[in-house]
Amino acid sequence: MKKLKPTYLLLILFATFSLHNCKKDNNNTKCGGDKYYYYLSEPAKSKVPYSGTDTLVFVSNNHDTAVCMGQGKKQFYVTSSFYANPDCPPNTDYYEAFNYKFIDKNDKLNLEINLYKNDGYVSEVMDMNINSTRLYPINLIYMYEWYYNDSVSTNMRQYKTFKLNFGLGNIVHYNLMKGIIQIQSKINVWTLSEK
């Protein structure tokens, strides 16, 4: 009987072990392909006070009116795949997200708000698009009533707000109970009307 050389024996053991790692084992576990879901917390969801079907009316400093009709609240997942083992299917992370769109039929003011778990981080984030200009994401961890840093008057009513400075002359005044109170751009200042 011919003896196997130690090199061949090691090669056979290595090949057997490698193939075993990408197949189901006796415990019915599989190689890769796992899905992990990360959901927004209830406090984070409450920081966007819209149902998605709201009608937001804004009046500009030029006396223009924008009637922004809610297009619904859409839930979706942002995905990120990673390989735990290059010989196996990737694992996938699913981060919960919500999208709110408000469209003015005259295209004077269109708003979009996205609320999502930040990919790769544990933070919860909100960003906005105003007339197709994307405003930088805001970490929701800092958005609590005791952090209000400004105020805005509208129709004889005063609101404490977060003054969110997005650069390029874009400022949004945001209130946790009412949402967007005022939008300032280089061209116009749009203030929420409560009539």
Image: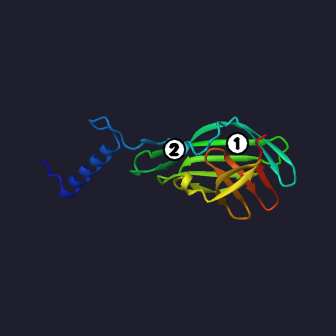
**What quarter of the picture does the C terminus occupy?**
top right
Secondary structure beneath dot 2 equals helix
Tag 1: amino acid: Lys
Residue nearest the viewer, comparing 86 with 171:
171
Answer above or below: position of 5 versus 155.
below
- Marks 2/1: CA distance? 21 Å
Residue nearest the viewer, comparing 25 with 72:
72
Q: Residues within 10 Å of mark 2 (few under 14, many from 20)?
A: few
Q: Residues within 10 Å of mark 1 (few under 14, many from 20)?
A: many
Total numbered circles: 2
Secondary structure beneath dot 1 equals strand
Instruction: Say if residue 78 shows up in the picture.
Output: no
Instruction: Say if residue 135 shows up in the picture.
Output: yes
Extreme residue in the left direction = 1
Name the residue at 87% across, 49% down.
64
Colour scheme shown: rainbow
Residue receiving disc 2? 43
Q: 154 left or right of 30?
A: right
Q: Quadrant of residue 70?
A: top right
Extreme residue in the front direction = 156
What mark, if any, has residue 160 been given in the picture?
Answer: none
- Which comes before the other along the chain, label 2 or label 1? 2
Residue receiving disc 1? 101
Name the residue at 25% across, 50% down.
12
Q: Position of residue 172 (x, y in %)?
A: 69, 55
Tag 2: amino acid: Pro
